[in-house]
Amino acid sequence: MRHTFISLAQNLPEGDLRRLCGQSASMDTRGVYAHKLCDDDTRIAGEVDQILGRYLDN
């Protein structure tokens, strides 16, 4: 359950995610528990496209 929750909520700020899971400040919560989700590549590509579009469309 912890792996699934952190994978789904991994875009929360690191401090909030650690607090929700009871992790210490030195724990690599995302590195240990987060896993790639099926739509991550598509979402990330869309975000990069938007960022580049701001500069290339000018």
Image (cartoon, grey):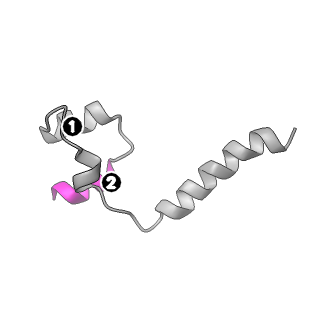
Exactly how many numbered labels are in the figure?
Answer: 2
Residue shown at the point (35%, 34%) measured from the top left: 13
Residue 16, percent from left and from top: 27, 32
Q: Amino acid at mark 2?
A: Leu
Location of mark 2 (residue): 8
Q: Main secondary structure of the magenta part?
A: helix
Which residue occupies 39% across, 64% down? 37
Magenta-drawn segment: 1-9
For marks 2 and 1, give the one nearer the viewer: 1
Residue furthest right as drawn: 58
Relative to 34, 2 lies left or right: left
Q: Secondary structure at mark 2?
A: helix
| 5 versus 25 height, above or below | below
How far apart marks 2 and 1 lie (CA) works out to 14 Å
Q: Would you name the residue on which mark 1 appears?
A: 18
Residue depicted at x 28% and y 51%: 31
